[in-house]
Image: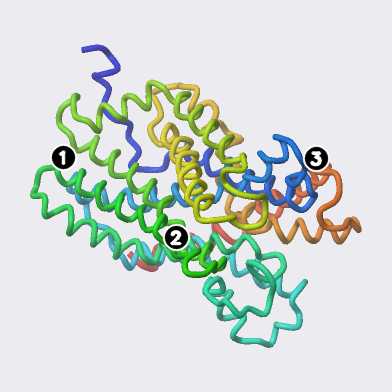
């Protein structure tokens, strides 16, 4: 047996710096996408504009990361016998992690651009609870009030957070019907997650029949395939740790990933290039039709899963994966990435107003540098004075 076969599966139960690097990439990819959209660069003819126009693939990357990280303890409890997840503590930690910084940005954006709605309690309630995406008769145009357009994806994230204990309980009940054998339980979990992923494809058909209802594209069911992909990776990791021999399928999978991370990233790049073609529909006009929607789901899932998997299962010791994703800069950017996500539209619109630029105009690179620096500064301040203090409240619920 060679040395690679004798390696134990990567230990990913705790914090993994490489995933911070993926989070940083996704966060700044969203920022680049939005600046490219506002400057018009993403609407230019040619392959470069096409690549910029599909930067929204970063959202599925975030969703898959959440599926992996949040379902991991549930999978470990079922397959390895780890302690069960305490739902009350889990939900409290999610609320403390997400809401304080989000509320700060909501208040800021409403004060700057939506003064006419400051006295409307219903608007405040919908926004502060992240329920605004479910109303189809809004008092604003598009995805949300000015400066908050990206928050639709956070609403989907939070819906997943709330649903996860129920989803995990249902999957566990289904898996236990396979008996105590780890392999059978894991396979049943993967089958259940396959059914969960299928919800997104069925939902995409529902969006178009009998009539096209574009608002359904931002509701949680359409994104379940991305969460399910990350959850499936969590199952494979827990399964690999629960296996006793080196020849089990899960251990072979983890060793194969660790041995060839570049192959996974190459597939992710190729899928992204295909997604930038007309197969996923026109740029910025929503999904053109049901087939474009189905292609987008499939290609974005491949991009997210193939980018994350080598980071979730890095080779032991020093490696290219760790040097690229877990260096000091990437770890720092990963820590402040939530603030980068939250503040970017506020900074983009404020910058354009300050410089007197019209929408869909301006120098892409010049605006990107300025907006990135300002957004990063806001993210660092938010992390230091809002996110970190809020996390100290985690001890209140155990």
Is the Cβ of the residue at disc 3 closer than 8 Å to that at disc 2? no
Spot occupied by residue 161 in the image (x, y as percentages of width and height): 41, 62
Count residues near mark 2 (Cα–Cα under 10 Å), then give few for <14, some for 14-19, many for 20+. some
Residue furthest toward the left? Answer: 179
Spot occupied by residue 136 in the image (x, y as percentages of width and height): 57, 76
Q: Please say whether residue 392 is visible from this viewpoint.
A: no
Left or right, residue 259 beside residue 219: left
* 248 in relation to 345, above or below: above
Q: Quadrant of residue 365?
A: top right
Looking at marks 3 and 1 on the same chain, the residue that comes earlier in the sequence is marked by: 1
Looking at marks 1 and 2 on the same chain, the residue that comes earlier in the sequence is marked by: 1
Q: Secondary structure at mark 1?
A: helix
**Residue at (14, 43) in percent of width and height:** 184
The residue wearing badge 1 is: 183
Cα distance in 3D space between marks 3 and 2: 38 Å
**Residue at (19, 24) in percent of width and height:** 246
The residue wearing badge 2 is: 205
Looking at marks 3 and 2 on the same chain, the residue that comes earlier in the sequence is marked by: 2
Cα distance in 3D space between marks 1 and 2: 34 Å
Q: Quadrant of the N terminus?
A: top left
- Nearer-the-camera pick, 301 or 151: 301
């Amino acid at each position: 047996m060679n040395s690679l076969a004798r390696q134990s599966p990567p230990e990913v139960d705790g914090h993994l710096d490489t995933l911070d690097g993926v989070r940083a990439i996704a966060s700044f990819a969203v920022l680049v996408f939005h600046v490219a959209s506002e400057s018009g660069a993403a609407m230019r003819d040619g392959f470069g504009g096409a690549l910029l126009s599909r930067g929204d693939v970063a959202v599925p990357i975030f969703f898959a990361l959440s599926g992996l990280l949040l379902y991991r303890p549930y999978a470990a409890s079922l397959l390895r016998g780890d302690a069960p997840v305490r739902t009350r503590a889990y939900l409290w930690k999610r609320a403390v992690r997400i809401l304080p910084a989000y509320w700060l940005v909501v208040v800021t954006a409403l004060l700057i651009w939506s003064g006419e709605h400051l006295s409307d309690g219903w608007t405040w309630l919908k926004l502060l609870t992240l329920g605004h995406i479910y109303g189809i008769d809004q008092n604003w145009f598009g995805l949300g009030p000015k400066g908050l357009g990206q928050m639709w994806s956070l609403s989907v994230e939070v819906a997943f957070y709330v649903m996860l204990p129920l989803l995990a309980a249902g999957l566990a009940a289904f898996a236990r019907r396979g008996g105590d054998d780890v392999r059978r339980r894991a396979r049943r979990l993967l089958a259940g997650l396959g059914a969960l992923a299928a919800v997104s494809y069925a939902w995409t058909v529902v969006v178009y029949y009998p009539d096209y209802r574009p608002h359904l594209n931002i509701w949680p069911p359409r994104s379940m395939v991305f969460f399910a992909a990350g959850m499936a990776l969590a199952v494979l990791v827990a399964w690999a740790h629960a296996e006793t021999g080196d020849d089990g399928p899960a251990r072979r999978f983890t060793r194969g990933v660790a041995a060839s991370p570049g192959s996974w990233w190459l597939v992710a790049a190729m899928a992204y290039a295909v997604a930038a073609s007309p197969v996923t529909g026109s740029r910025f006009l929503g999904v053109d039709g049901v087939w474009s929607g189905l292609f987008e789901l499939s290609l974005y899932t491949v991009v997210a899963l193939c980018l994350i998997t080598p980071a979730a299962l890095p080779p032991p010791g020093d490696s290219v994966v760790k040097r690229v994703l877990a260096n000091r800069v990437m770890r720092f950017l990963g820590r402040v990435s939530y603030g980068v996500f939250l503040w970017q539209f506020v900074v983009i619109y404020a910058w354009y107003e300050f410089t007197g630029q019209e929408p869909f105009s301006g120098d892409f690179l010049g605006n990107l540098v300025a907006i990135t620096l300002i957004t990063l500064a806001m993210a660092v301040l938010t992390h230091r004075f809002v996110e970190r203090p809020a996390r100290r409240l985690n001890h209140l619920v155990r």
